[in-house]
Image (spheres, helix red, strand yellow):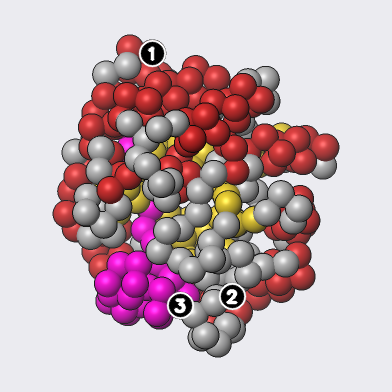
Amino acid sequence: MTETVHIVETLRDAWQGLPRPVPTARKLEFIERLLRAGFPRLDVGSFVSKSRVPAMADTDEVVAALVALPELKDRLSSDQRPHFTGLVASEAGLERLLGSPLVDEVLYPFSLSERFQRRNTERSREEAFALLRELAERAHNAGRTVYATISMAFGNNEGEPFDPAELRGWVERLHHDGGVDRVGLADTTAQADADTIARVYEAVMVRNDWPVPGAHLHVTPENQGALVGAALEAGCRHFDAALGALGGCQFAKGAVSNVSTAPLVRQLREAGFRPDVPEAALGALETQARALAAAP
């Protein structure tokens, strides 16, 4: 049987670092296009300080408006329900997320790099982990799942040592003590090559009861295929991507673009996998994504 590969269209990561915020109405129009095209998984925003990430200041407004879409309301209780992810980094952010019946997955940003953890969330790794445990318990009690991305999972440009064995330890803690349902490995500052990806996945997959981590890669057009291929070979079946190859982390030095959705889908089909993103409308949607990012 052909294996399914799951793709999350990460609108949050695509939009948060743009020079100008995308207007709320245009965000809603584009998300509605994605839903009509059949995209099953969308990362729609960040429930964080509006001053810290101004581009995500309207996340509450966006998800409230989406719930009111007649087409979406009908699908929320069906097998065709799209899934929505929102990022939180505090108790207040989780409270905002739980106020929406739309967002069913909580994304928490964890970092293998102590320096980046402090810059990104103003907490140490141990402090961030303790908060994650509390947030995960509350999220599960409210019927949400929890997804933790580990930033700098393939190396860092912070001048800190990189040890895949240390990464493996954090993956274990997140699964067994942190209450996390799934983990993603993020190449936050584009440190990885294909050999590094293979080595990292081999290091973390030492127990059969762990799900294979997803991949949140930052790439160039020239190396996307090789990096995705290495992750697939290692067993990864979950990828974050962005139409038009937009995005990157504005808190990281030297970050480059997200995996581009359309080439990813083509690569998966050519390799014999079944991506869960529809292919027919991708060309037009890629054009629209770039136009949205470039609009004044």
User: Looking at the image, can residue 142 be seen?
Assistant: no
**Magenta stretch: residue 69 in it?**
no
User: Looking at the image, can residue 124 be seen?
Assistant: yes
Which residue lies most toward the top here? 70
Marker disc for residue 288: none
User: As displayed, is residue 13 above or below residue 263?
Assistant: below
Q: Residue 234: x, y in percent?
A: 73, 61
Who's the residue at 64% across and 26% down the image? 282
Kind of residue indicated by mark 1: Glu
Q: In this view, does 145 lie to the left or right of 280?
A: left
Residue count near mark 1 (Cα–Cα under 10 Å), binned few <14, some 14–19, many ≥20: few
Q: Give the total of numbered labels.
A: 3
Marks 3, 1: nearer the viewer: 3
Residue count near mark 3 (Cα–Cα under 10 Å), binned few <14, some 14–19, many ≥20: many
Q: Name the residue under label 3.
A: 113
Q: Tag 3's secondary structure?
A: loop
Q: What's the CA distance linking mark 3 and mark 1?
A: 42 Å
- Sequence-wise first label, 3 or 1: 1
Q: Residue 117: x, y in percent?
A: 37, 73
Marks 1, 2: nearer the viewer: 2
User: As displayed, is residue 225 above or below residue 176?
Assistant: above
- The image quadrant where one finds the N terminus is top right
Q: Name the residue under label 2.
A: 155
Q: Which of 257 and 272 is in front in this view?
A: 257
Which residue lies most toward the front here? 296
